[in-house]
Image (cartoon, rainbow, N blue to C red):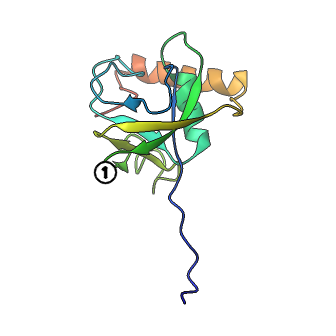
Amino acid sequence: MSSDPIEEAPIYYHGTKADLKTGDLIEVGFSSNYGTKRKAKYIYLSATLEAATWGAELAFGEGKERIYIVEPTGPIEDDSNLTDKKFPGNTTKSYRSQHPFKVVGEVTDWQGHSPEQLKTMKDHLEKLKQQGIEAIED
């Protein structure tokens, strides 16, 4: 008998303003929710609710902010937009993939950031945009 604890698979989240249902696939090729809204080469997910919250709050569009629980259908890799550039070692547990994510549920009881935190982040992103720096680099 092994005394090793059973390691559970991580729960992954995707923050967006898209209205999705359980079983839907989130795929590459649609306009990005960030930057210049060019066609996305990657889709993003996180193992933290905090990162998914930012995703939902900062996504383009007028839809309701949503956080979905997703399962990757293929390999995922560290999100190079955050790892080793802004947060060494992937402390945000943010990942990306070119393979679809399957929606398996929705988090309905999450807490958004304060208006002040949201304004600070949006101001920062606007400053980067004015400097010609993309929020998402594929």
Residue 107, given in percent of the width and then of the height, sits at 63, 35
For image coordinates 40% across by 51% down, the residue present is 84
Residue 4, given in percent of the width and then of the height, sits at 55, 81
Q: Quadrant of residue 66?
A: top right
Residue 37, given in percent of the width and then of the height, sits at 35, 17
Which quadrant is the C terminus positioned in?
top left
According to the image, label 1 marks what residue?
75
For image coordinates 54% across by 34% down, the residue present is 68
Which quadrant is the N terminus positioned in?
bottom right
Secondary structure of residue under mark 1: loop
User: In front: 52, or 130?
Assistant: 52
Residue 32, given in percent of the width and then of the height, sits at 36, 22
Total numbered badges shown on the rendered structure = 1
Q: Quadrant of residue 6?
A: bottom right
Q: Quadrant of residue 106?
A: top right
Pick out the residue farthest to the bottom: 1
User: In front: 107, or 40?
Assistant: 107
Few, some or many residues within 10 Å of mark 1 (<14, 14–19, 20+): few
Is 56 located above or below residue 3 in the figure?
A: above
For image coordinates 48% across by 40% down, the residue present is 70
Q: Is residue 108 left or right of residue 52?
A: right
For image coordinates 45% across by 57% down, the residue present is 89
Amino acid on which the number 1 mark rests in the picture: Pro
